Image (cartoon, rainbow, N blue to C red):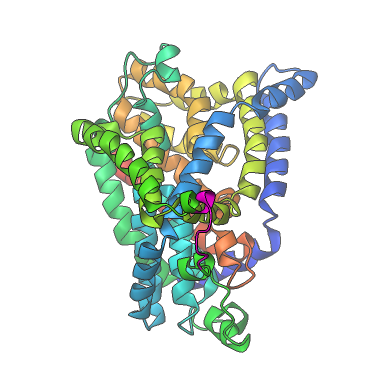
């Protein structure tokens, strides 16, 4: 039954889902209409609200771009690439491939959601070797792994709330930082993580089609094209004929000693920092700094790291141009008071017990318009945090509920597919609409699962 439902949704999404930028344009118009209908905002003010928000996420956009590119640089380093290649060679059946893709993606994205392109590299290595894999479902296996990322080490809201001097402290919404040990280490988050790791791969297996269409069999198409190496592995992307250094600049560009000095300097700070703070030391800046230093270590020389970064930034162009448009939508929500209206609806029918659930639902709905965990938290936190304190709901659980609400409806919004599709299209031309019917099925199932966990687990 689930297989048939998946095929039905896949067919409808392939016909109806527009490009992610068009999706952003449509959501901008819908947000403006909602603001006019539900708030006292004047028509002419909508445009100023939109523009005020347009450039309101530049710092956060840079942090998000770094999470993706720095994580990708780690993933396409030669040591990691060889590890993936060795693992991929041991997998020879489609079922094992789907399970491996799902589990590897879950592990990587939980460590750092910026590693989603790395999961794509691993997936391409498998899909070009094994016939009978539906490339659409392989992409869906990657994208569904985004569900628990807000419970992992790069979770936006928990990291922002644990950043000293964050804007929520300055706004008087909280008195001090909320340690990530209290949010990411909470019982409800641990249960949601375990649930995701167990059920997502199982659901993917239930969605496997009875027969794979030849046009979606990547290994078959790769073989018919003469086995031309088009995949984005570390070996094919970054391996170049070495040029003997002949000048001071060449020697500096290829200097392992210079890189090692910087790497040691970075680790001298960051390792004692994490030893001292543990999980509570995780925030956007420390995560990015760690992956920067780790990437430099894995690539070995400045010039190799620059080459890796050039490869990494190719995949974020579409994402970067869309951030301002979603920030514009955020501006409409913030400055028109629409976010407060939406949040207040759920406050009016909530108790301390049910408020985390309604926070989850609020975040899931608003995420369709603002598909950025940090950006959405900036919009909703001024309404969510005071309401939670008034009702007596635990802030830590509310923050986790928000995160999973933000994550789950990403599966019906194509925005974040831009983080890994540039890797996938090097093997086969595929679009988000080709596989998001499958992710929509997982989205619906997990809305009920997460809701149940939030009500049952303290």
Q: How many marks?
A: 0
Confirm whether residue 98 shows in the render. Answer: yes
Pick out the residue farthest to the right.
44
For image coordinates 36% across by 49% down, the residue present is 257
Q: From this view, report whether residue 75 is shown above or below residue 8.
A: above
- For residue 399, above or below residue 387: below
* Quadrant location of the C terminus in the rendered image: top left
Q: Place residue 79 in its image quadrant.
A: bottom left
Q: Eyeballing the image, is 69 above or below 42?
A: below
Residue 441 image offset from top left, x and y in percent: 49, 60
Q: Residue at x 37, y 63 (%)?
A: 80
Relative to the observer, which residue lies in front, 386 or 309?
Answer: 309
Based on the picture, tell me whether residue 249 belongs to the magenta stretch: yes
Q: Is residue 348 visible?
A: no
Range drawn in magenta = 242-250
Magenta span: chief secondary structure: loop
Q: Position of residue 11 (x, y in %)?
A: 63, 68
Residue placed most toward the observer, 111 or 178: 111
The quadrant in which residue 328 appears is top right
Queried whether the magenta region covers residue 121, the answer comes back as: no
Farthest residue toward the left?
276
Left or right: residue 393 versus residue 404 is left
Q: Residue at x 56, y 36 (%)?
A: 61
The percent coordinates of residue 23 (x first, y second) are 68, 47
Residue drawn at 50 percent across, 79 percent down: 128
Q: Position of residue 116 (x, y in %)?
A: 46, 55
């Amino acid at each position: 039954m689930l297989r048939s439902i998946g095929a039905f949704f896949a067919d409808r999404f392939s016909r109806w889902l527009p490009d992610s930028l068009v999706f952003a344009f449509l959501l901008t118009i819908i947000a403006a209409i909602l603001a006019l209908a539900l708030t006292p905002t004047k028509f002419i003010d909508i445009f100023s609200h939109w523009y005020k928000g347009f450039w309101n996420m530049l710092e956060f956009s840079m942090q998000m771009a770094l999470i993706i590119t720095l994580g990708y640089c780690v993933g396409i380093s030669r040591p990691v690439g060889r590890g993936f290649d060795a693992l991929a060679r041991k997998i020879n059946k489609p079922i094992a491939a789907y399970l491996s893709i799902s589990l590897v993606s879950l592990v990587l994205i939980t460590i750092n959601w910026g590693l989603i392109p790395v999961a794509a590299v691993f997936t391409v290595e498998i899909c070009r070797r094994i016939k009978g894999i539906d490339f659409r479902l392989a992409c869906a296996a990657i994208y569904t792994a985004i569900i628990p990322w807000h419970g992992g080490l790069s979770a936006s809201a928990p990291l922002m709330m644990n950043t000293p001097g964050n804007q929520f402290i300055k706004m008087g919404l909280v008195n001090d930082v909320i340690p990530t040990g209290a949010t990411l280490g909470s019982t409800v988050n641990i249960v949601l993580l375990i649930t995701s790791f167990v059920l997502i791969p199982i659901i993917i297996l239930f969605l496997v089609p009875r027969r794979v269409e030849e046009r979606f069999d990547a290994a078959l198409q790769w073989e018919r094209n003469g086995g031309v190496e088009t995949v984005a592995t570390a070996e094919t992307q970054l391996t170049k004929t070495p040029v003997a250094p002949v000048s001071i600049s060449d020697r500096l560009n290829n200097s392992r000693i210079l890189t090692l000095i910087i790497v040691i300097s970075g680790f001298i700070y960051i390792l004692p920092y994490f030893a001292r703070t543990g999980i509570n030391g995780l925030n956007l800046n420390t995560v990015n700094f760690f992956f920067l230093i780790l990437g430099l270590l894995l690539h070995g020389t400045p010039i190799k790291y620059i080459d890796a970064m050039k490869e990494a930034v190719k995949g974020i162009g579409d994402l970067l141009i869309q951030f301002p448009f979603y920030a514009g939508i955020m501006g409409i929500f913030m400055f028109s008071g629409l976010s407060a209206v939406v949040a207040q609806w759920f406050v009016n029918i909530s108790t301390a017990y049910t408020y985390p659930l309604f926070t989850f639902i609020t975040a899931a709905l608003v995420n369709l318009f603002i598909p950025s965990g940090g950006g959405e938290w900036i919009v909703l936190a001024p309404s969510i945090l005071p309401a939670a304190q008034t009702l007596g709901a635990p802030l830590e659980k509310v923050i986790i509920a928000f995160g999973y609400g933000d994550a789950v409806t990403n599966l019906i919004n194509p925005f974040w597919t831009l983080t890994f599709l540039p890797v996938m299209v090097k093997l086969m031309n595929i679009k988000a609409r080709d596989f998001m019917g499958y992710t929509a099925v997982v989205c619906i199932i997990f809305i009920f699962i997460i809701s149940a966990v939030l009500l049952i687990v303290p």
